[in-house]
Amino acid sequence: MHIDIHEQTEDNLAQLVKRAVAGEEIIFDSNGTSVAKLIPLKQGANKPRRGGQWKGKVKIADDFDELPEPFMAAFRGEKRRCCI
């Protein structure tokens, strides 16, 4: 079903949603051009994510969060002449 968006679609939006959930394809047109489609969400689309898919596949180095002392000194505002 094609609906012109310049008509009073706000008044019957709930009805259009019900029709889309029932399986009808609702297409919104503007000046003769299709601009949007109202479709129901797929079942299970809002499932919560589960973790652990990368377990055993990624290794983080033991010194991952350690920075060289001259670099840390610069963050503390200490004036040092250094090369990293």
Image (spheres, helix red, strand yellow):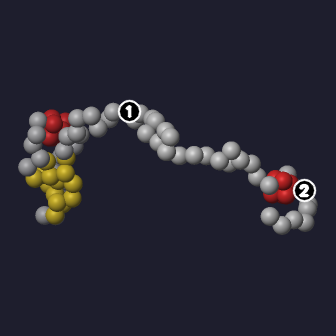
Around disc 1, counting alpha carbons within 10 Å, would you say few (fewer than 14), some (14 to 19), or many (20 or more)?
A: few
Residue at image point 90% right, 56% down:
78
Residue at image point 53% right, 46% down:
58
Quarter of the image with the C terminus in it: bottom right
In the image, taking residue 58 as reference, residue 10 lies left or right, namely left
Q: How far is the residue under mark 1 from the one under mark 2?
A: 47 Å
Pinpoint residue 53: horizontal percent, then vertical percent: 43, 39
Pinpoint residue 82: horizontal percent, then vertical percent: 87, 65
Residue at image point 61% right, 46% down:
60
In the image, taking residue 38 as reference, residue 59 lies left or right, namely right
Q: Is residue 2 above or below residue 50?
A: below
User: What kind of residue is marked 1?
Assistant: Pro
Pinpoint residue 25: horizontal percent, then vertical percent: 12, 47
**SS category of the residue bearing label 2:** loop
Which sits in the foreground, 69 or 38?
Answer: 69
Instruction: Write down the quadrant of residue 44 in the picture.
Output: top left
Which sits in the foreground, 21 or 69?
Answer: 69
Task: Judge whether residue 54 can be spotted in this image.
Answer: yes
User: What kind of residue is marked 2?
Assistant: Glu
Residue at image point 45% right, 35% down:
51
Task: Judge whether residue 12 can be spotted in this image.
Answer: no
Q: Earlier in the sequence, mark 1 or mark 2?
A: 1
**SS category of the residue bearing label 1:** loop
Which sits in the foreground, 59 or 8?
Answer: 59
Q: Is residue 27 above or below residue 10?
A: below
Pinpoint residue 75: horizontal percent, then vertical percent: 81, 54
Numbered marks: total: 2
Q: Which residue is mark 1?
A: 48
Q: Is residue 55 above or below residue 68?
A: above
CB contact under 8 Å: marks 1 and 2: no
Q: Which residue is mark 2?
A: 78
